[in-house]
Image (spheres, rainbow, N blue to C red):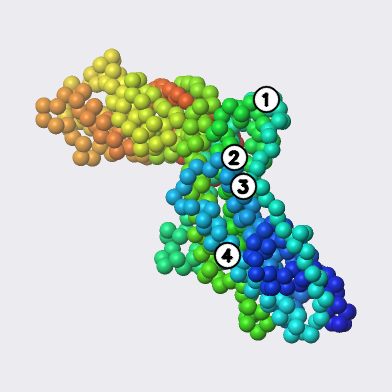
Amino acid sequence: MVYSDFEELIVTNGKKLFSLCDFTITQKNRGNILNRKFLGRLNLESTWMQETLDSYGSKHNNLWFPFREAIAAQKLFSSVCYDLIHLKKATPYYYLLSVERDFNLEIDEILESFYSAILSISKSLLKFLRKQKIQVDLIPINLELINEVYMDYQLETTKRNRKMQNPEQTLVYLATSFLNLGSDTEILECEKSVKKKNYEDCIPDHISEEELRLIKAQFHNLQSMYDTHLSKTYIESTNSNLHVLRGHISIIFHLLSSATNLSHYYERHMLTTKFSFTTNLILPMSRRKLLSILVEFFLHFTTLYFTAARSLCQSIISEYAEDGEIMVGIPKYRGFHVRPSTLISKIVLHYGSKVSMKMDDEQYNASSPLDLFRANEKINSVKRKYIGRLIDSGTLLDDFHHKAKLEWPKMLQLVILDLMDKEEIILYEKSLSMKGNLPEKDESPEEFFKRIITLFLASGKIDIRSNLIVSFHGDKRVLYDLKTLAGAGYGEDKYGNNIMLPSELAYLQR
């Protein structure tokens, strides 16, 4: 195909687009540009023109590649503007919780920036056509066809509620899934860690299009789950918190959709493009400006609305989660040390429920590893008392009374080995040296034995067998996973070696 034929194809397929660009330039009323009907048409025609250009290899042609990039930019900014206007119209019906910044006020500021970009692109496209001496017979734009008529009005709700099985369980699962996305949304707050707002330092290394797309998909799934299983159910009609939760899921999804598009444009079209636009076309927006909007508006409001809904989800879980109780043994290796306590905490935090652990009359917060560590004081006390009862109830140390004190350390080694054979004690070191551990003056065999055992226990050289039982109280879903964890030795064997967790707990590896 010769260029004259290709240029004729560009005119044929792009006539509507170029007419919309000319309308953008000549139209003094910005409201005729910043409305969804016009932006939707501009996005449609930009998409069609980009597909036309790509079909004929424009990405590999020095002349047409800048033109193709400008078309891609028009497609992007028209799409993001459309979504922003949608949010501006929809947020009054989202029942959003208040946040520290005025969302609708800032939308207008962002729309003004994007309008300038669309205007700049429109001028560049038509300038390019003139430079290539490509004649286009522009089509007059009918204002009636692109003018959006909007009324602040809602139809009366006449649709009956649906009967769904166990909507409470679905709601608790939905709220739990929302909370579990907290670690994903935390990465979006890069503005706090970047000096002088130099966002190029964190995008795409810290935040990328790929990560945003994945997070966006997760919130889209939550939105779909709600609409499929909870919308128009009796539980929605009786609990206004559901509408609030749905609103927060929706606004976060839309914000992340636009953030993904902007990140894509930055990474694909701004960051990797090596040629200069200044020879043929100009960039519609500087890198710094685009990244500032991406981080300070889209990503920041995402985290604000997520944080605002966090306590709401926790209250929903507390209201609808079914409580129960389980009794399980303590971790065999050193009790509630770092690994088992962390795994217990992760399970509780995964579901977002309040779960407590009880040992005798003492209660512990199961979501806090540090609080669980406290249980070891009682556990070690019980273990020491257990050894004391062994001494008091038998002839364990009878021979000590007939031997010199210098022989006691070696005799104590033999006693410990005997207790190991009876599985009363577990040895964590290959050899149990008694060097430096001599009896004190006027110390009885029983006192010597208890002191050395306490020392070895505290230093982690040995452990004492115990059949201690603790109880967990709270959300049955959490309790089920905690019972599974306990059945798997809390992820450790009796020597403290990590073992594979059951498949039901695979989320703990993430």
3D distance between C-alphas at marks 2 and 3: 12 Å
Q: Is residue 276 left or right of residue 64?
A: left
Label 2 sits on residue: 246
Label 3 sits on residue: 90
- Residue at the (29%, 35%) spot, across then down: 458
Label 4 sits on residue: 112
3D distance between C-alphas at marks 3 and 4: 19 Å
Query: Is residue 165 something that shows in the picture?
Result: yes
Estimate the x, y position of residue 448 in percent, counting from the top left.
20, 28
Q: Amino acid at mark 4?
A: Glu
Vertically, is 191 above or below 119? above
Q: Earlier in the sequence, mark 2 or mark 3?
A: 3
Helix, strand or loop under label 4: helix
**Proximity of marks 1 and 4: CB atoms separated by less than 8 Å:** no
- Residue at the (37%, 33%) spot, across then down: 372
3D distance between C-alphas at marks 1 and 2: 19 Å
